[in-house]
């Protein structure tokens, strides 16, 4: 994800200009990369952010993310 975002930002001279951001086409390039990243994270499982754990325990968040993915 970071490589795609950095490449998009490098193409835009003035990120405050909405027209330049839209014309750069990065808005169309991000979703497929983001979906792949999310799918990989879901395979790994959702870990708690508040503490270190050896196994993913956040099944509620994982289920919510999977439900929302199914709707898209």
Image (tube, helix red, strand yellow):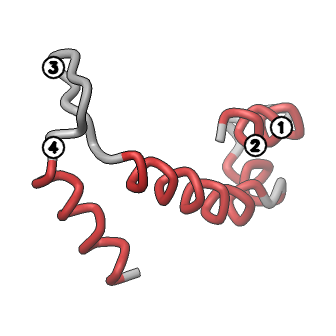
Q: In percent of the image, x 80 and y 49: which residue is there? A: 20
In the image, farthest residue toward the left = 60
Distance Cα–Cα, label 1 vs label 2: 5 Å
Q: Which label was assigned to residue 50?
A: 3
Quadrant of the image containing the N terminus: top right
| Mark 1 vs mark 3: in front | 3
Q: Could you say whether the residue bearing mark 3 is in a helix, strand or loop?
A: loop
* Residue on which the image places disc 4: 58
* Residue on which the image places disc 1: 7
| Residue 63 occupies quadrant | bottom left
Q: Could you say whether the residue bearing mark 2 is in a helix, strand or loop?
A: helix
* Residue on which the image places disc 2: 4
| Mark 4 vs mark 3: in front | 4
Q: Could you say whether the residue bearing mark 4 is in a helix, strand or loop?
A: loop
Position above or below: 8 against 42: above
Q: In percent of the image, x 19 and y 63: which residue is there? A: 64
Q: Is the residue marked by circle 4 packed among few (<14), some (14-19), or many (20+) residues within 10 Å?
A: few
**Mark 1 or 3, nearer chain start:** 1
| Mark 3 vs mark 2: in front | 3
CB contact under 8 Å: marks 3 and 2: no
Q: Position of residue 70 (x, y in %)?
A: 34, 81
**Mark 4 or 3, nearer chain start:** 3
CB contact under 8 Å: marks 4 and 1: no
| Residue 58 occupies quadrant | top left
Q: Which label was assigned to residue 24?
A: none
Distance Cα–Cα, label 1 vs label 3: 32 Å
From the viewer's side, name the closer residue of 31 and 55. Answer: 55
Q: In percent of the image, x 83 and y 54: which residue is there? A: 24
**Mark 3 or 2, nearer chain start:** 2
Q: Is the residue marked by circle 3 packed among few (<14), some (14-19), or many (20+) residues within 10 Å?
A: few
């Amino acid at each position: 994800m970071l490589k795609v975002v950095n490449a998009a930002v490098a193409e835009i001279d003035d990120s405050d200009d909405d027209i330049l951001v839209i014309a750069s086409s990065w808005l169309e390039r991000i979703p497929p990369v983001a979906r792949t990243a999310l799918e990989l994270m879901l395979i790994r499982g959702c870990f708690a952010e508040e503490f270190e754990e050896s196994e993913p325990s956040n099944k509620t968040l994982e289920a919510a993310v999977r439900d929302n993915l199914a709707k898209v």
